[in-house]
Amino acid sequence: MWKLWETGESNLAKVGVVGANLIARSRNNRKNQKRRGMITARRTLFCAQAALASLIACLLIGMTTARGDDASTIAAINKASAQLDDAFVKGNAKEIRRGMTSDHLAVTAYYDGPQSVEAQIASLGDLHYSQKNLAGPDVILLGPQAALRTFTAEFAGTFKGKEIPRHQFVTSVMVKRDGRWLERFYQTTTLKP
C-alpha cells in the first residue's frame, strides 16, 4: 500500500483490492492463530500428562517391595529411636547427644519453639513424661542413608509444669552417619482424643 502513495497513484480500485487482501489475510491469521493456539494447548496438555505419568512411574519405581536387607535397616532405625526415647525419659544427656545429629531440630507442642540439641538438654529438668506408642512405628526408607519414621503415641507428663498434650502424632527423620542411625529432626502434632 505504501508503494501506491510513493508513486503518486491514487487508484481507489487498487487500494480497495489491497485493503480486501489485508482483511482476508487478517481473518486467515486469526483462524491460524486459533489453530495454533489449539495445537499449543494440545501440546501443553500432552506434555503435562506425560510429566504426570513420568512422576507416577518414578514414585512407583521408588516404592518397590521391601528387600531382605530393608527389614534389618528398619529394625536398626527403630532400635536407635527407642534408645533415644528411653534416654529422654531417663533424662540422660550423654545418650541424647549420642542419638541425635549435632544439628538436630525438635518442634513440639510443649516446647516454646524449635529446639536445638543443646536447648533440649538444657530443658531436661523441666521435662517429665512417659510415652506409650499406640500405632506404628511406620518407617519409609528415603534412600540408603535416610528414613522417615512416624507413629501415634499417648504422652503423660509435664513440661515446665504444664501438661503435655496427651495424644500426638510423631514424625522423625533418621539419618545414617558413620554406620549409626541418628535422629536429625523430630516433630509432634497434637491429635484430638
Image: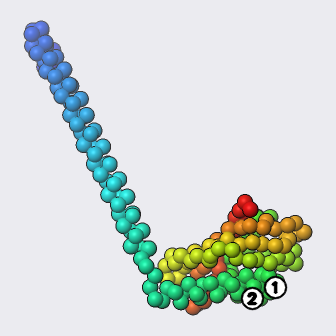
Residue 17 lies, in percent from the top left, at 11, 15
Amino acid type, mark 2? Glu
Question: Which element carries disc 2, helix, strand or loop?
Answer: helix
Report the Cα–Cα distance between label 1 and label 2: 10 Å
What numbered label is drawn on residue 90? 1
Q: Residue at x 49, y 79 (%)?
A: 143
On screen, residue 184 versus residue 34, left or right, reads right
Question: Which element carries disc 1, helix, strand or loop?
Answer: helix
Residue at the spot of label 2: 95
Residue 69 lies, in percent from the top left, at 48, 89
On screen, residue 162 versus residue 13, left or right, reads right
On screen, residue 116 versus residue 160, left or right, reads left
What numbered label is drawn on residue 28? none
Q: Is residue 84 above or below residue 27?
A: below
Amino acid type, mark 1? Lys
On screen, residue 148 versus residue 34, left or right, reads right
Q: Which quadrant of the figure contains the C terminus?
A: bottom right
